[in-house]
Amino acid sequence: MATAHATLSNFRQAPRKMRMVANVVRGKKVADVLTNLDFTAKKASLPIKNLILSALANAKTLNIPTENLVVKIIKVDSGKILYRRRPAARGSAHPIRKRTSAIFIELGEPTVSTKKVKIIKESVKEKVVRPKTIRVKAKATTGIK
């Protein structure tokens, strides 16, 4: 089974925000994904769309039929972290971490899943029914009549 892939390194957006869009894309057909990303109101949708188009172009150069490709793998890992400082009280400084993302996309043909069906055997033994215990609350007596 032939696959095509593309990567994007050190994209200047946090991986947590990129994964929100990547989770929507995973496992779907490329044609459906491209139309959905046009209407997604996230900054991460444009670079992911361009990366899918790049992987699609790679598939064409490898002579892979592109009609029924799906997004098999999409991984968003953390890239390099840019460290900055923010001035704080009394001459101190607090760190600021500007995070980047590294994205990997692999397109491939959909796999036909054969699910194994488990046959559950009914137990021959009947369940033992135990009588419920009845608890009686004792009334508190004050001793005054």
Image: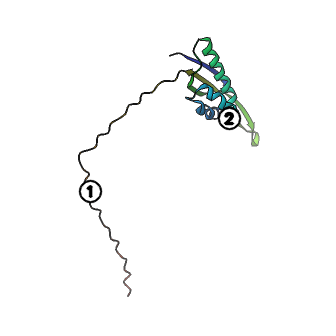
Q: Position of residue 142 (x, y in %)?
A: 38, 81
> In the figure, 67 relative to 97: above or below?
above
Does dot 2 land on a helix, a strand or a loop? loop
Residue at the (67%, 24%) spot, across then down: 10
> Mark 1 and mark 2 in contact (Cβ < 8 Å)?
no
Visible residue check, residue 12: no
> Quarter of the image holding residue 62?
top right
Q: Which residue is mark 2?
A: 40
**x 53%, y 21%: residue:** 109
Residue 27 falls in image quadrant: top right
Q: Depth check: 96 or 64 in front?
A: 64
Q: Residue at x 68, y 26 (%)?
A: 47
**Residue type of the residue flagged with mark 1:** Val
The residues bearing labels 2 and 1 have C-alpha atoms spaced at a distance of 56 Å
- Place of residue 133 in the rendered image (x, y in percent of width and height, measured from the top left): 29, 64
Q: Which residue is mark 1?
A: 129
On screen, residue 71 above or below 89: above
| Image location of residue 91, percent across then percent down | 76, 39
